[in-house]
């Protein structure tokens, strides 16, 4: 991985820099010293990213490349930083959260502190994923329920659909438009007692437990237009 360009007096300078490495999560320490310093092409190959991605992380001040002659190169610390960044990206941690994490890591003074900070970031991401899964599962169940209801109601033949009067149809249409109570009675030209009987009849005909469900079922089985 390491270019022959680095075998010689230049490598001494880079070896001395590694002694001043900051504390980063323990998992990112493994091969940093062995690979450093890395030219940009080898850095991209090591982490499976493009040169553009590396430039982007540099613009965001997450990593830093230096010049060695005409080459852009990364020292051991920046290789380790890239290992942390890639691990975070793989589990879906946002760029903003990664920036916050790397900024906090720059202030730690012990290895245990760095490991603890990274552990908290992992736990936070785990909670986010768990919450997302819970929401997704609820949405999937709602979709299944709607599909089942639609399939059942859409399969009702025209001749099997309940017969409704013009007044009941007008009532259902107004219900779908959001009318209810006294406003609904006035628009239908009936009193509240008559409206209550009308709604009870509609709920019984449509097998609904309330007027909103009755209106929805009327649409789903084709009594009312979508």
Image (cartoon, grey):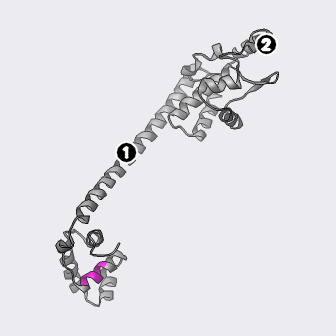
Question: Splitting the image into 4 quarters, where does residue 79 fall?
Answer: top right
Towards the viewer: 176 or 190: 176
Towards the viewer: 33 or 186: 33
Q: As drawn, is 81 to the left or to the right of 190?
A: right
Vertical arrangement, residue 118 with respect to residue 194, above or below? above
Q: As drawn, is 136 to the left or to the right of 220?
A: right
What stretch of residues is rendered in magenta? 167-172
Q: Residue at x 73, y 23 (%)?
A: 73
Q: Residue at x 23, y 64 (%)?
A: 155
Front position among marks 2 and 1: 2
Tell me the element at label 1. helix
Find out whether the residues at labels 2 and 1 contact each other: C-beta distance under 8 Å.
Answer: no
In the image, farthest residue toward the top: 8
Label ID, residue 10 = 2
- Asked if the stretch drawn in magenta spans residue 133, the answer is no
- Name the residue carrying label 1: 134
Question: Splitting the image into 4 quarters, where does residue 224 fall?
Answer: bottom left
């Amino acid at each position: 991985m390491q270019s022959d360009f680095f075998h010689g007096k230049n490598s001494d300078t880079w070896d001395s820099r590694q002694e001043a490495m900051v504390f980063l999560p323990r998992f990112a320490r493994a091969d940093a010293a062995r690979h450093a310093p890395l030219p940009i092409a080898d850095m991209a190959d090591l982490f499976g990213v493009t040169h553009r991605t590396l430039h982007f992380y540099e613009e965001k001040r997450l990593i830093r490349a230096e010049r060695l002659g005409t080459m852009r190169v990364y020292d051991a610390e920046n290789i380790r930083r890239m290992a942390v960044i890639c691990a975070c990206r793989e589990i879906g941690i946002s760029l903003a959260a990664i920036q916050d994490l790397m900024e906090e890591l720059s202030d730690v003074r012990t290895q245990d502190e760095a490991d603890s900070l990274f552990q908290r970031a992992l736990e936070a991401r785990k909670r986010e994923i768990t919450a997302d899964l819970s929401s997704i599962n609820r949405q999937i169940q709602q979709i299944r329920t709607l599909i089942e209801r639609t399939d059942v109601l859409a399969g009702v033949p025209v001749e099997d659909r309940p017969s409704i009067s013009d007044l009941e149809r007008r009532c259902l249409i107004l219900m779908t438009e959001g009318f209810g109570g006294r406003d609904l009675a006035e628009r239908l030209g009936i009193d509240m007692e008559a409206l209550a009987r009308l709604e009870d009849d509609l709920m019984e005909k449509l097998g609904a437990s309330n007027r909103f469900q009755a209106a929805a079922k009327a649409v789903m089985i084709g009594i009312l237009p979508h």
